Structures are given as C-alpha cells and as structure tokens.
Image (cartoon, rainbow, N blue to C red):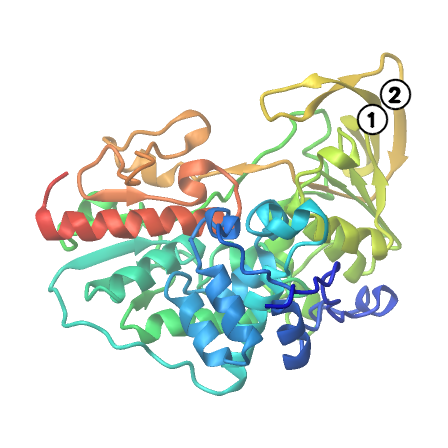
Amino acid sequence: MAKKTIVPKKTPMPEQPAEERIHNYNEVPYGYTEEQAIAEAKRCIECAKPLCMAGCPVNINIPGFLKLIADGDFRGAVNLVKETNALPAITGRVCPQETQCEGVCTLCKKFEPVGVGRLERFVADWEAAQGALPVPPLPPPTGKKVAVVGSGPAGLTVAADLARLGHHVTIFEALHEAGGVLVYGIPEFRLPKAIVKREVEYVCSLGVKLVKDFVVGNAATVDELLEEFDAIFLGSGAGLPWFLGIPGENLGGVYSANEYLTRSNLMKAYRFPEYDTPIARGQRVITIGGGNVAMDAARTALRLGAKESIIVYRRSRDEMPARAEEIHHAEQEGIIFNLLTTPVALHGANGRVTEMECLKNELGEPDASGRRRPVAIKDSNFCIPTDIVVVAVGQSPSPLIPKTTPDLKVAKGGVVTVEEQTMKTSKKGVFAGGDVATGGATVILAMGQAKIASKAIDEYLKTGAW
C-alpha cells in the first residue's frame, strides 16, 4: 500500500474580509464547500490510537465521521456525529478545538491538525441545506418525567439525550428565547441565531416540551417541580457578572459584558431602529478582560460604530484564555490590545466615565491557573480616555435557585456542588451541569457534563437508587 502524502496545512476556510465585516453582523467564516470538506477530511491519517476522541468532551467518533466525509457520505457523517452531539452546528463554530480534539491530533507533531471543528460545522450545515432535519426513531415512552432548568447548551444536551431514551422532558427557560448563552452572549457574527433556533427546534422535534418566560426559583421552586417531575437537571448557567471593585464602576457608560452583549444580541440593539433597545454607542470603547466574552464585546463595539475598540488585559497575549481564532479575528478587525495593563480606577465628569486609570504590569511566577501572574510596576500609572467601558472578567451563577432551595449545597462563587462522576447534587433527584456547576466555562464542557448527567439521570429513573 502506497504511503499517504500528508498535506501539511489545513484547507483554508473562506471568510469575510475584515474591512467589510466590521460594518455588518454577518457570520465571519463562510464555511467549507463540499470539495474543500472532502480535501480536509482526507488529511486524517486514520491513526491506530485516535487521541482526538479522548480530547472531545462529548466523545464524538471523529475518525469515523472524517472517513465518511472523505468518502462523500455526508449523511452518514452527520448521523454519526449526532449519535453523541445534538448540537454540531453550534459546537463546530464555538468549540475551542485547538485545545481539545485538534490540540491532540497526531498531525500536530509536524503539521497543522485536521480541521475537525470546520468539518463538524460543514456536515451540520449540509444537513440543514437538505431541508427539515430528520428525527431518529424514538423508543416507547417510559412514563418518567424530567424537568430541565435552562435551555443553554447543557440543558439542550440533557433534554435531547433523555428524550432519545424515551423519557418525557420539559425545559423551563427564564428568557423569552431559548438557547441560553448561545442567544444572549455569543454575537451573530460568530454564531447566527437562526442556527441556534434550528438546533433548538431539532431538540423539540424529539418530543421535548419548551416552556419560556418561566423563572425557576420564582414562578416555581425546585421543591415544587419535584412534586410533578421524577428528576431535575439544573442547567441555568452563570448570569451574574463580576466587577473589579475599583472606584468609578458606578459611573454612567460602564457595562457588564452580560448586559452589553444581551442588549446587542438577545434584544437586537444592533438592528436599530427596527428594534429600539437602547445601547450606548461610544466612540472609544474599552473592554476589560482577555477571554472569548471580552473578544465578543470588543468586536461588537466596532460594529456598533466605535472608532476605537480597545482591549485592556492584565497579562500578555500568550496568557489570554480566548480562542486563538477569536484573538486573530479581533486583531484583523483593528481591535487595539493594551496588554500587561491593570485598571485601578475609572474617572468621569457629569456622572459619566471619561477615562480609565491603569498600571503597567510585568509577569511573575505562574499562579494556580498555570499562567504567569501579573505583577504591578510601581508608579507606572497612566490614563486612557474612554466613553464606554465593558467589564468582561467573569461571571458566576445566579443565587436565586440556591436561595429558594435550602438543602442544595453550593461552593465558593455560588456554583452548585456536584459529584463529577454523576453530576448529582446534594439534593435527591436533582442533577446539575454546565456553568451553574463550574462558573463561566465553554459550551462544549457544559455539554460534556450534560452527557454525564443524562446517563446518571437515566440510571436513577430506572433504579431509584441515589
């Protein structure tokens, strides 16, 4: 058998030019054509020990679906992906593949890894282009009822898994649109909302009931839901924003990233005047933080008309937790990066922010995160003029459900305490996963925890053993 010739670099994915996309909200990458997808899938060397699967939190059969794409069997490929991932059009776009499946690809030793995320996105979009998404055969109803709190990636994953096992599932969503962080947090140019809606509709087509505008802990408590349901999964996310606690954060023009992105994304402020949601459109916008949320906010500011959009981050570029692709896109679009910089105060006039006072940093020894700790340089204070500040330094779960569920244990930061092997909480019949159990993390990690929870919930429903 002839030795396979390896193409060293990924097949490029076409995308909007930066100078055009900063003026619109259309998705940045266009996606692969069929020919490009086949060419990229053929880069897989079909290694004997596929490390890529171990790097995937939901354990997709990556070599299997790549082989099917290489053979031109797109239907077979998407069906195989959906055996373990109900949301491939979403994860293919927002999953940090470079640190997971692609990060451990055997090709990485000498070449660029196979573009697994791009191919996952391709098969999902190919399926959607064929028309209505086919519903897999479902087993007879078990008679068991499960309440899922939250319709974000964790909640949708649990709901889909349990519905495919024959259980009756009801999702309770606090907002007026389903999708959780997928609709209120991630901008249209990174994840079009029509795609989220399509994936939600697919989950509902499995027999899942969706109840919107229902705040658990207010409209009904967890204890009240347990009177009607046999088990509950808490997937309510992390919607409580963090602030820095510095002087001036109460000035006008200072937003949490949660509010800024929710106004723009879920409440459609970017489509003014069609939607009249108010949002401040500053000429000089500073976003504090270095994660994906910070990149989303800074890039949104440009599209809302900012002449300058600036990232202020306390470490160097190498320590930034945002995806490499998101940092790259931000740099292409002209985002200004003020690195090794820590805000110490916000100053204003007439009640509105006018400048940010900062200190310069140098990097010290690694901290608990493994990244080098920022150390302030004495007397290095300087100020940056600004009219809008967006704080994107993290978030934690809302305290509403724990406050109304006294026997539900929570840990530091308000996260719900769970057993990692089962995602069981301290309360019988109640499971949790995603950001409510971890604090702010990634979509795919939330889905991975949801996969663990759905298996444990099914076992609990069958045996009653806790």
Instruction: Say if residue 173 shows up in the picture.
Output: no
Residue at image position (54%, 71%) is 195
* Residue type for callout 1: Cys
* Residue type for callout 2: Asn
In the rendered image, the vertical position of residue 464 relative to residue 276, given as above or below: above
Q: Which label number is shown at residue 381?
A: 2
Foreground: 76 or 306? 76
Residue at image position (70%, 73%) is 30
Q: Which label number is shown at residue 441?
A: none
Q: Is residue 32 left or right of residue 216?
A: right
In the rendered image, the vertical position of residue 412 relative to residue 48, given as above or below: above
* Residue 26 spot, x, y in % from top left: 71, 71
In the rendered image, the vertical position of residue 362 relative to residue 254, given as above or below: above
Residue at image position (63%, 59%) is 114
Q: Where, by quadrant of the figure, is residue 72 drawn? A: bottom right
Q: Which label number is shown at residue 358?
A: 1
